[in-house]
Amino acid sequence: MRMPAPSLPPGQPEPQWLSRALFVERVSLGMVLFVSVGSLAAWLFPAVGESLPLAVTQMNIPLAVAAQFCALSLLMSETGTPPLLLRISRGVALTAVVIAATILVGSALPVAEVKEFLHLGGQAELNAGSLSPLSASAFLFLSVVILMVLGEGKVVRRAADIFVFGLCLFALVLVSQDMFGVFGVFGLTAADLISAQVLFCLVLLTVVVTLRQARGGVFAIFLGGGIGSRIARGFAPVLLLWPFVREVGETQIGFQQLIPAHFATAVLTALAVATSLLFLLFLAWRINDMETDIHDLTLRDDLTGLYNMRGFYLLGEQTLRLSQRAQLPFSVLFLDLDGLKQINDELGHNAGSAYLRETGELIVENFREGDVKGRFGGDEFVVAGQFSMVGIEVAAQRLEAMAAERSAAAGRRFPLSFSIGHVTAEYYSTETLKELIKRADEKMYEEKRRKKVERQ
């Protein structure tokens, strides 16, 4: 069985997020191997260690070996790995589990020789926290999670989502502890902290495991190209960093005695509330924006931007009810674009589409924003709103005059002209919107027949 990967159509390049994730994984694993192998080489060959940076040679050797096995397991299980190599990678991950478990058990044993062996590598005064039950537990948990991520079966991979989340939380706890130690919060000393090299490798391996699981799990939201993914990526750093900023800021303000401690707490709490509200407002704005887009996609005509039949009836029925409640007259105008078939036959469908778009533009210019304007397909348009009989008559005449003015200015072969029918219902009328549209349609056809007779 191969590692699961997003299915792509033949010949289609891999998604940008996938290539970026692979790049981050390889760079992270390379850095882990560089630090862990450097520490091991410096311990085995002191002369080599002298030529390497001090930061690369101070990692605890048993933990460096565990980190190497974890990194190798992840390297051998990239997308498209052959089944044999994938099985070997699981064996390597299982070996990492055994190594980390041995380190954890050995660090708890009251045997001097065992403790001396487990503290191989680094200098005690530079690396007081090079090995602790906490760091050993972290690598044990990490290697178990890697084994689960590489596992087969839907249940195992769903459980891996939970365990990866737990691993991220564990790593965040360790990073928090070291950050508080660096800033002198809670009076932590170097002996209370995990060494920088161990924490560095642990964090990078956690990143790789999370990216690997994200290809088929709930963490995929951070890798996608959709709006939700972009929001998640944009706000994740803020949500992760803010608690640390608040805690460190409060402590530093207290130490420096810049302002009273209670006031500092109040200020930082207010900033936290403001940040949360801004986040909420942004999410609400984006959701409303997406809702509008989805609404328009289902209710709008692509060519003209007017409502389609479904959208027109939905909004028109509401406008009719509002007119009846306000005891105002309600009118419907039905419009047919003259000569569209001839335009399509002689000038092409692109020209016909241009005529339809221009008709939509004139309707938008001529009628009010609150009027419901729609295209019923083909060459038919409908407008409904709170018009009196005189008002809809004036609007129809104005629309015809605007079309004639445009046609005269453009010197067209086929003028932009319409056949229009309109009807008006008083507020006490019991006619439905469909009945009004039907009457307006009949009036439009009367106008069309009249024009045909006049041309003969």
Image (cartoon, rainbow, N blue to C red):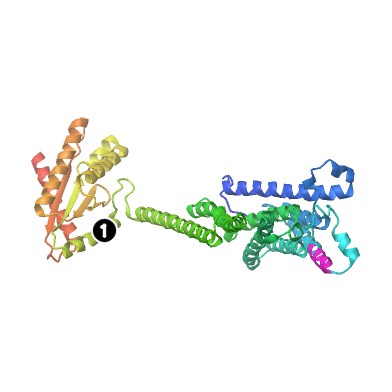
Residue 414 image position (x, y, % from top left): 21, 35
Residue lying at 79% horizontally and 51% vertically, measured from the top left: 36
Residue farthest right in this picture: 113
Q: Is residue 399 magenta?
A: no
Q: Quadrant of residue 216?
A: bottom right
Residue occupied by mark 1: 315
Q: 331 or 99: which is nearer to us?
A: 99
Residue 256 image position (x, y, % from top left): 61, 54
Q: Magenta-highlighted stretch: main secondary structure?
A: helix
Residue lying at 69% horizontally and 60% vertically, measured from the top left: 187
Q: Is residue 102 magenta?
A: yes
Q: Bounds of the magenta span? A: 100-108
- The answer to whether one can see residue 448 in this image is no
- As drawn, is 116 to the left or to the right of 346? right
Q: 373 or 69: which is nearer to us?
A: 69
Q: 216 or 190: which is nearer to us?
A: 190
Q: Quadrant of residue 154?
A: bottom right
Q: Quadrant of the C terminus?
A: top left
